[in-house]
Image (spheres, rainbow, N blue to C red):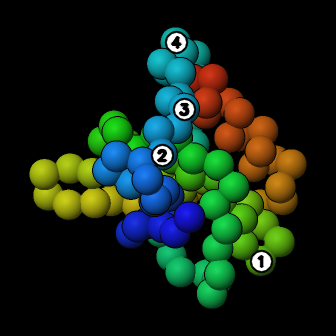
């Protein structure tokens, strides 16, 4: 498997070459706001641990680099692609944030 652009998985033999992933649940009435920050290159190597489906204009990736984890938010608009990141922090804290995001309890 290789990646296309911003870490979007490309799978040989799959129509369109992309894997269909899970979607985040609809946003709950009460949710935790995520401190989204502009993307900044901080590490030479980055590993994408999990991701949501990129069939929607906004999709997310759970990323790991340099011993820390963060969530990357990619939004495709008519004006282009905008990428933000959650704060880089220890794995346990970021994995909890990832689960809240998938459940619609964080945005």
- Lateral position of residue 64 relative to residue 13, left or right: right
64 over 20 or under it: above or below: below
Find the distance from the CA under tag 4 to the CA under tag 2. Answer: 30 Å
Q: In this view of the protein, which residue sits in the foreground, 9 or 38? A: 9
Q: Is residue 23 visible?
A: yes
According to the picture, the residue beneath numbered tag 2 turns out to be 19
* Residue at 28% over, 60% down: 81
Camera-side mark, 3 or 2: 2
Label 1, residues with CA under 10 Å away: few <14, some 14-19, many ≥20: few
Label 4, residues with CA under 10 Å away: few <14, some 14-19, many ≥20: few
Camera-side mark, 4 or 2: 2
Tag count in the figure? 4
Q: Earlier in the sequence, mark 1 or mark 2?
A: 2
Q: In this view of the protein, which residue sits in the foreground, 50 or 34? A: 50
Percent across and percent down for residue 26 are 48, 18
Q: Earlier in the sequence, mark 4 or mark 3?
A: 3
Percent across and percent down for residue 68 are 78, 67
Find the distance from the CA under tag 4 to the CA under tag 1. Answer: 35 Å
According to the picture, the residue beneath numbered tag 4 turns out to be 29
Q: In this view of the protein, which residue sits in the foreground, 22 or 18? A: 18
Label 3, residues with CA under 10 Å away: few <14, some 14-19, many ≥20: few
Instruction: Determine whether the residue tagged by mark 1 lies in a helix, strand or loop.
Output: loop
């Amino acid at each position: 498997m290789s990646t296309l652009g911003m870490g979007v998985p490309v799978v040989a033999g799959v129509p369109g070459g992309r894997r269909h992933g899970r979607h985040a649940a609809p946003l709950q009435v009460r949710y935790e706001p995520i401190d989204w920050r502009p993307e900044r290159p901080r590490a030479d190597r980055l590993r994408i641990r999990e991701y949501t489906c990129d069939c929607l204009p906004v999709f997310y990736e759970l990323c790991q680099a340099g011993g820390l984890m963060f969530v990357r938010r990619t939004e495709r608009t008519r004006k282009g692609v905008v990428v933000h990141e959650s704060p880089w922090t220890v794995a346990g804290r970021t994995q909890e944030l990832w689960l809240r995001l998938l459940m619609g309890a964080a945005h």
